């Protein structure tokens, strides 16, 4: 009989990587580059909270949700427990987020670490629809996952259809490597309909006076 994933062992492994100095922030650096300063960000399937902690360190208003108590316990030990709540990917909605004490709308949503692989095709489509409903106009969804597991790029594109989420970029890793059909990993960037609010200040754009 298949007993399913050993979440306690996974949580212990990830805690060890975090406290031993393993680089668990590469997805956070990618998201930070995409985001305006002090963006409101939701990490769906946040695990032990490394991305949330890294984004908070960079000045963003980041929160994480995960359905697994074992990893949330580690997140609460390593970081401020008020940043995290128990909620599954398919349960995301403005009402559900308010009910657990989190903001109802976000500038960017992150799903990293094969979260889609745990969802059926129908559940992935529902998750994309629900995420689109809590994204601000022009907001982004970033999905990092294996191309070989369930919930890979083809399933994501099907799930995005009709949600208002449009695929903007797809890479083979978090370092902007070019994606091809043989890439074992994918990082997909979707944008919600509408225009996001312009950043205050120059934001890297400078106008030269005469």
Image (spheres, grey):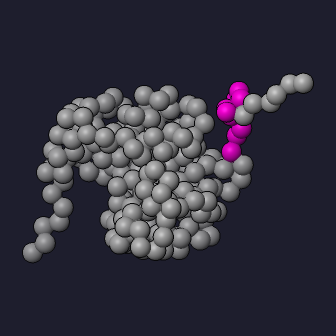
Q: Say whether residue 82 is visible.
A: yes
Residue visible at 59% across and 71% down? 161
Q: Does residue 139 appear left or right of residue 180 in this picture? A: right
Camera-nearest residue between 149 and 44: 149
Residue visible at 57% across and 51% down? 140
Q: In this view, does 175 lie above or below 203?
A: below
Camera-nearest residue between 88 and 186: 186
Quadrant (top left, top right, bottom left, bottom right) of the C terminus: top right
Q: Where is residue 159 in the image (x, y as percent from the top left)?
A: 52, 70
Q: Is the magenta stretch mostly helix, strand or loop?
A: loop
Camera-nearest residue between 202 and 140: 202
Q: Toward which corner of the image does residue 3 lie, by quadrant?
A: bottom left
Q: Which residue lies furthest to the left in this view?
A: 1
Q: Residue furthest top?
A: 210
Q: Does residue 159 appear left or right of residue 185 in this picture? A: right
Q: Which residue lies furthest to the front in this view?
A: 210
Residue visible at 68% across and 57% down? 193
Q: Say whether residue 104 is visible.
A: no
Quadrant (top left, top right, bottom left, bottom right) of the N terminus: bottom left
Residue visible at 45% across and 61% down? 172
Count of numbered circles on the image: 0
Q: In this view, does 60 lie above or below 180?
A: above
Q: Is residue 77 magenta?
A: no
Q: Position of residue 131 (x, y in %)?
A: 52, 56
Q: Position of residue 59 (x, y in %)?
A: 50, 28
Q: Does residue 69 appear left or right of residue 171 in this picture? A: left
Camera-nearest residue between 141 and 73: 141
Q: Does the magenta stretch include residue 198?
A: yes
Q: What stretch is highlighted in magenta?
A: 196-204
């Amino acid at each position: 009989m298949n007993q399913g994933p050993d979440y306690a062992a996974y949580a212990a492994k990830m805690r060890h990587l975090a406290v031993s100095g393993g680089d668990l922030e590469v997805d956070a650096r990618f998201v930070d580059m995409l985001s305006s300063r002090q963006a409101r960000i939701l990490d769906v399937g946040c695990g032990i909270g490394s991305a949330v902690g890294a984004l908070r360190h960079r000045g963003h208003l980041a929160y994480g949700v995960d359905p697994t108590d074992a990893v949330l316990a580690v997140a609460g030990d390593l970081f401020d427990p008020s940043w995290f709540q128990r909620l599954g990917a398919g349960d995301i909605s403005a009402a559900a987020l308010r009910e657990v004490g989190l903001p109802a709308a976000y500038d960017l949503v992150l799903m990293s670490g094969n979260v889609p692989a745990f969802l059926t095709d129908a559940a992935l489509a529902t998750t994309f629809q629900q995420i689109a409903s809590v994204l601000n106009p022009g907001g982004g969804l970033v999905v990092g996952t294996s191309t070989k597991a369930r919930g890979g790029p083809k399933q994501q594109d099907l799930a995005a259809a009709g949600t208002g989420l449009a695929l903007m970029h797809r890479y083979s890793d978090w370092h902007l490597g070019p994606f091809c059909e043989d890439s074992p990993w994918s990082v997909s960037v979707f944008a919600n309909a509408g225009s996001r609010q312009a950043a205050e200040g120059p934001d890297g754009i400078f106008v030269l006076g005469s």
